[in-house]
Image: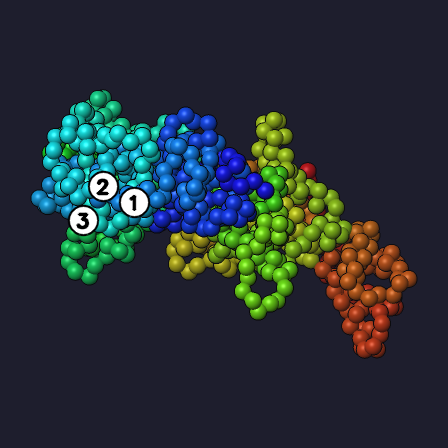
Amino acid sequence: MSTVTSRTFVVHLADHSEATFRAARRVTIHADILKSAKLCAGDVVAVSGATSTAKAFAVGIAWPSHDVSQDFVLVSSSLLLTANLREGEKIEVTPLNGSKLSPHLPSLRKAQTARRVRLAEMDIHSKPQAGSSSSKQAGHGAVGRRDWLTLLIREALVDLKYLTPTQTLDVTYEGQDRRFRLSSVYTSISEAEATNENELADGLRNLTMSTSPQLWIANWDTVVQLVDAESKDQSPDTTRQAIVAVGHDEAPQAYTAVGGLDKQIAQIRDLIEIPLTRPDLFRHFGLKPPRGVLLHGPPGTGKTHLARAIAASTRSAVLVVNGPELSSAYHGETEAKLRDVFAEARARSPCIVVLDEVDALCPRREDGPGGEVEKRVVAQLLTIMDGMGGDDKDGEQERVVVVATTNRPNAIDPALRRPGRFDREIEIGIPDAEARYSILNVLLKKAPHAISSEDLHSIAARAHGYVGADLSAVVREAGTLAIKRWLSTQPLTDTPPVCPSPSSYQPQLTHADLLTALPSVRPSALRSLFLDTTPVHWADIGGQAGTIARLRECVEWPLLHPDAFARLGVRAPKGVLLYGPPGCSKTLLVRACATESGVNFLAVKGPELLNKYVGESERAVREIFSKARAASPAIVFFDEIDALATSRSSSDSTGGVHEGVLTSLLNEMDGVQELVGVTIVAATNRPEAIDSALMRPGRLDRILYVGPPDLQGREEILRIRTRKMSVEPEINFAEIARMTEGYSGAELTALCQEAALLTMKKDMNAPYVPSDAFVSAARALKKQITPEVVARYERWRDQNGVTEA
């Protein structure tokens, strides 16, 4: 295997999750490469370009890893800039403890101790100015903050330890990324004490007659001095540039961690990034930048996550405010805390203030449940937001933007929802199949998996109604399954586990893991209404082939063939009414439809909707349809709908309550707000009691009669019901089917149950249920569906002109 010194590598930027400066000096190389080169973790190495003629180099420490390719080397952005490299370039890695070094590389033995270092800030985004609003609050404020920054930089230099002439350093201070480059280094006490010389003398001190490369060591005795070298030839306006403008054609790194919200991100970048990055353009046109954006949508869709990504993408400071953190029992203290938050935001400008769950902080004042404290907080926030966007004493705009999140936008005080406060309201809705695929891609980016793009698309297509938080739970559950599977293959030993080699088996997520985890996580929108129903398939239902085919047309076709509906310019049926005698598998058909189509299933029971308080029943209907829209595509099943939608022309004494529920049903099914992705399926054995307005096209489009099975259907039902029973091998199901003329599916199921009980009565040790037991049970069972009952349904069908599709 090749050693470090005899090969080249491709350099890539490391994604250090550690918040320490020591991670910035790591040069991550495959462990086998280091082993073959007889290098250990922590050995000092130099990184330089393989083809470059420049003499720039960076010094770091070797760091082994099994997760990196043998052809790659991972370094931090500081080392990349120090060595004047770009990601993807070929590099050389050279140990500095060797005897034979390249002429442009220094020797560790000749490294000198740095007594004083001077650093100049590079122009990636501005540092706080001495005359900024944050320094005007107290005379010593700016000096104090500069001292803290100097201490932070010295700590970073000590962790780096080795400094080169082109050394670059990245730090994060007060929420801002700051970048510094080494300006000069003093190695003697006399040079270190002479700090007030003129620029010419300073330049002469940095000159040296030696052409050998230089290397310095920083320690806790090194004095750090910050200089504004780049600002001497710039105007005050250009030095106040707060952040670098991000072009719309290249997505910031922060947004890559947000999946499925491309449309919303494009809107937000227009609203927030331009005012924060180029405020001079707004001043040029005499415009005031947006002050706030309201993100609203169901829980778990990524509102707070997106708000944090906004702040990270603009390199702005971010202040997250939660309602309970501001609450106080003392009069006026809540408002004072709110004022302090925005005062800090102005001091750290540019800054984004995230108001999470703003409906709890600022409820409606006129009819909300809040008291005087909430009203004062709302008034205080209105005053603060009206005062935002003005100029400070230097004539510069205070760049503070408020990003609020809520899942109840109508609960917020209306005074906040106007231009000048929350200028734009952006809905973060339930993701569709493509958005779910994008979210899964983001969640699986750092997880080892063997899932193809096609398999991931199929998972996304099946996860109806799942939001980002639900999909994150699915991936976490799948990961747990993969870990358990891997642990089950490991031998049980008392010795601690060692780091596995690349050739050993590693746990990976598979398509089967995601398929297993998906049913275990319920969609957030349906957790209060979700029913754990036993899966029922079309093969479990006999004697209803025609009804099954028409039901599949209404529910499955719009999901499987949306392009055909769009091409022909037709809309999917909104509702189906199943009517017929009791026990003819109406409810079973709906359960099978939900199982086979894979859509979310909501079962509504009449008593759950009816409430003695005025308006509560109607509100329950609205909430059910609201949840169904949020979890679309979904099936809402109303069993025994005649109890809820009684005809308004009837003389029922409870018509007042039922009329309110019926009106809500009519409005939700075909009202002003269009019902998209939700199919209504209702079942009844009293179709004449249902209001006629409910059964017109556009509401219940398909009206299907589910009657008793015919001879072939009864034989099919008997075979299905005895599939898991031990029956006589030569049993004649056709003969039993002829004996049960007019029986419903429920009665045939009861017949099988009764035959088994009769067999157990005669012989508890019987090996199977004989044929005569079925005959005896058929003779003893009384059928409930008479010819008069069937004739009544056919008469209603003819009178109302109902024709089945």
Q: Residues within 10 Å of mark 3 (few under 14, many from 20)?
A: few
**N-term mark: 1 or 3:** 1
Q: Which residue is mark 3?
A: 340
For badge 3, the amino acid type reads Asp
Identify the image quadrant of the C terminus: top right
Q: Residues within 10 Å of mark 1 (few under 14, many from 20)?
A: some
Task: Name the side, left or right, on which 685 lies relative to 6.
Answer: right
How much space separates mark 1 and mark 3, taking CA atoms?
42 Å
Look at the picture and state if 592 lies above or below 186. Answer: below
**N-term mark: 3 or 2:** 2
Q: Say how many tags the image has.
A: 3
> How far across and down, in percent of the image, does residue 450 sit?
61, 45
Q: Nearer the viewer, mark 3 or mark 2?
A: 2
How much space separates mark 3 and mark 2, taking CA atoms?
45 Å
Q: Which residue is mark 1?
A: 217
Task: Name the side, left or right, on which 185 lies relative to 604.
Answer: left
> How far across and down, in percent of the image, does residue 68 sit?
52, 44
> How far across and down, in percent of the image, does residue 281 sit?
25, 24
Who's the residue at 11% across and 41% down the image?
136
